[in-house]
Image (cartoon, helix red, strand yellow):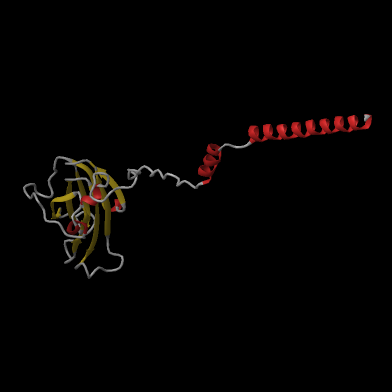
Amino acid sequence: MEKLKINAYYLAVLVYLVILVIAGSYFVYNTYRPSENLHQDQQQDLTLQPTPVTPAPAQPASPAVPITGSTQDPVSRCNPQDAEPRVPVPVDTSVPIQDPMPGIRYSLNESESGRTIVLEKGEIVEINLRWAPGVAWSWNIPVSGCGLELVNDGYYDTGTDFWNTSGHYRARYRAVSPGRSFIDGTFGASPSGIANGAPEFNLTVIVK
C-alpha cells in the first residue's frame, strides 16, 4: 500500500511537470510568434520598388563660347561677300590725296608693314607707300574682312627724285563697324604680275 502511494505521488509530479512544459511552450510560442501583419509587411518590403528618376536640370549654354551672329563675336556679323578679298571703292574724293585730312589716328609707311592696330568707329588709318612715277607699276591693295571703308586713295608726285621721295601712293581707311579687316598690298604691273622682292604692305585692323 505504501509503495502504491509513492507511485501515485511520482505520477502526479510527472503530470504536473508535463503541464508546466506544455504551458510554457504555449506562452513562448504566443509571445514570439510573428503576427500576420508583420509577415505581410516583410513580404511587401521584399518587393522591388522602382527608383524614381529625377531629371537633371537643363544646363544653360556657356557664354564663353561665341554664338555665330551674336554680339559676342563682331567678326561673325560680316556678310559672306565682305569676308572675301576685294578692292574697295573710295567714298570721298573731295579732299585731294596729297592734302591733310582730319580724323587720322594712324599714319603708317611701308616700314610698318605687318602691324595690328585698333580703331574706334569713325577713326582713320592712313598708309603712305613708295611709288615710282617712271614705271607702269602700281599698288594692288585688296581688303578682306569687315569694319573698314576706303575714304580716298591715289598717287601723287612731288618731283624730287625717281623712287624714294618723289612718288607716293596714299590710301585712307575709316572704321565704320565692329570687326576685323586685313589690308594686303603688293606692288607690280598687275595682281598676277608681281616680281620677286617687290614691295609689299600688310596691316590688320580691329575695329571696336
Q: Nearer the viewer, residue 66 or 140?
A: 66
Which residue is at the far right? Answer: 2
Which residue is at the far bottom? Answer: 193
Where is residue 176, by image quadrant?
Answer: top left
Figure check: 168 above or below 191: above
> Which x, y percent locates residue 155?
14, 56
> Which x, y percent locates residue 31?
64, 32
Q: Nearer the viewer, residue 56 or 179?
A: 56
> Going by the image, does 177 lie left or right of 19?
left
Figure check: 139 above or below 28: below
> Going by the image, does 156 lie left or right of 199?
left
Figure check: 52 above or below 162: above
Image point 33% across, 47% down: which residue? 65
Quadrant for the N terminus in the image? top right
> Which x, y percent locates residue 101?
13, 43
Image point 23% across, 62% down: which residue? 187
Figure check: 55 above or below 5: below
Q: Nearer the viewer, residue 30 or 113?
A: 30
Q: Nearer the viewer, residue 54 or 135?
A: 54
Which residue is at the far front? Answer: 1
> Which x, y percent locates residue 9?
86, 29
Which residue is at the far left? Answer: 94
Image point 19% across, 61% down: which residue? 139
